[in-house]
Image: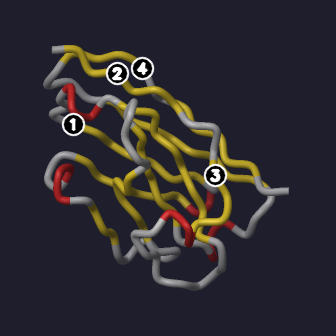
């Protein structure tokens, strides 16, 4: 049974930073591309960033480019999201997700991700 557990959320002032972590169990982590998504109140879930299984390729939604960094430590079965220069528009529940199949280049579609964490709240105050 796959389990993804996110930590690191919280409340921060605009301009601040947070680092999210997602530890995976129950899957061969090093074989799976991973992603971070977020969902703000009243809005659809959207992609934030993805990272390929080997970590050699990353992808970001335009609104976070230059501010957020996705990374992974396959030895620890953990994926990270470093978030800098946060704005109130970044306020959302952030979800970690594992791609549905191993060895695939990650897409931007949430439907292609088969396992999800419970989410962690990030609140940015102005």
Nearest the viewer among 21 and 44 is 44
Mark 2 → mark 1, Cα distance in angstroms: 13 Å
Q: Secondary structure at mark 3?
A: strand
Mark 1 → mark 4, Cα distance in angstroms: 14 Å
Drawn side of residue 104 relative to residue 36, left or right: right
Of marks 2 and 4, the one in the foreground = 2
Dots 1, 4 in contact, CB < 8 A: no
Q: Residue at x 56, y 45 (%)?
A: 22
Q: Quadrant of residue 75?
A: bottom right
Mark 2 → mark 3, Cα distance in angstroms: 20 Å
Query: What's the mark number on residue 116?
Result: 3
Query: What's the mark number on residue 10?
Result: 4
Q: Which residue is mark 1?
A: 84
Drawn side of residue 13 relative to residue 104, left or right: left
Dots 2, 4 in contact, CB < 8 A: yes
Of marks 2 and 1, the one in the foreground = 2
């Amino acid at each position: 049974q796959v389990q993804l557990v996110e930590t690191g959320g919280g409340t921060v002032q605009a301009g601040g930073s947070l680092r999210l972590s997602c530890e995976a169990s129950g899957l061969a982590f090093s074989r799976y591309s991973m992603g971070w998504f977020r969902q703000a109140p009243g809005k659809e879930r959207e992609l934030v960033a993805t990272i390929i299984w080997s970590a050699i390729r990353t992808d970001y939604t335009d609104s976070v480019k230059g501010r957020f960094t996705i990374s992974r430590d396959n030895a620890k079965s953990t994926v990270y999201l470093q978030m800098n220069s946060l704005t109130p528009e970044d306020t959302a529940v952030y979800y970690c997700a594992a791609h549905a199949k191993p060895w695939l280049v990650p897409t931007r579609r949430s439907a292609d991700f088969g396992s999800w964490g419970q989410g962690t709240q990030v609140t940015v105050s102005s």
